[in-house]
Image (cartoon, grey):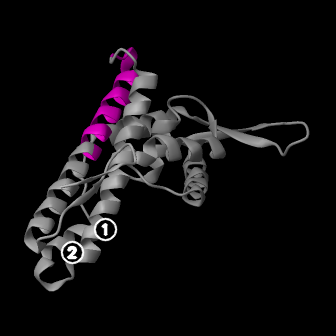
Amino acid sequence: MALGDAILACLTERPMTGYELAKTFDSSIGFFWKADHQQIYRELSKLRDRGYIQGREVVQSGKPNKLVYTLTPEGRTALRHWAARPSTPASTKDDLLVRLHALDSIDIEPLRADLMARLEHHRDRHANYERILKKRFPDGTAEGKLDLGNLLLLRLGARHEQMVADFCEEALEALSAMSGKATVVPMEDGKREKG
């Protein structure tokens, strides 16, 4: 997937400014496709040059004018062609996993601290997915294709974060058993539990 494809997919929801696109990436697509604001603005220029999007200037009083981007028919066609191709499974590049692979050659305590930080990170992200799910889909159902796509993505995100948090707990327990130290696992409510 290219960043341009992700931007085209966002613009199917509604016309957006570059700023709104960047915020959409931060709050939704950014969970599974990272892009910083500068990358998004550069890609918008490329998509405009290709004729996939058009920008309409909106005059504002007391503020600078803004450009609102919409898909062109050519952009919708490009998005459909991209979506019809087979996807490529994501590759994992995670230095924590490399450290586990080299466990016999590294110090365990920094690894334990890293695992505990990761555990908290993934628990926080899981809680965030659950909050979004409850807010956007309180009855657990979706209306229409767009809602269904978002519901499925949120469910996948929540499951992924829970799975990684469970793995971190398992790894911490295994390292604790190996080192003979008690496991200190941060709990979601801010309390700590000793195992």
Q: Residues within 10 Å of mark 2 (few under 14, many from 20)?
A: some
Q: Is residue 178 above or below residue 70?
A: below
**Residue at 54% across / 58% down in the picture?**
36
Q: Are marks 1 and 2 in contact (CB under 8 Å)?
A: yes
- Location of residue 100 by image quarter: bottom left
Rounded to the nearest whole Å, what is the CA distance between mark 1 and mark 2?
10 Å
Image location of residue 28, percent across then percent down: 46, 40
In the image, 184: left or right of 37? left
Image location of residue 123, percent across then percent down: 33, 47
In the picture of the structure, the residue carrying the numbered disc 2 is: 99
**Residue at 59% across / 58% down in the picture?**
42
Seen from the viewer's position, the closer of residues 94 and 176 is: 176
The magenta region covers 141-161
Q: Residues within 10 Å of mark 1 (few under 14, many from 20)?
A: some
Residue extending furthest toward the bottom: 105
- Location of residue 180 by image quarter: bottom left
Element assignment for label 1: helix
In the image, 104: left or right of 14? left
Seen from the viewer's position, the closer of residues 80 and 40 is: 40
Q: Earlier in the sequence, mark 1 or mark 2?
A: 2
In the picture of the structure, the residue carrying the numbered disc 1 is: 114
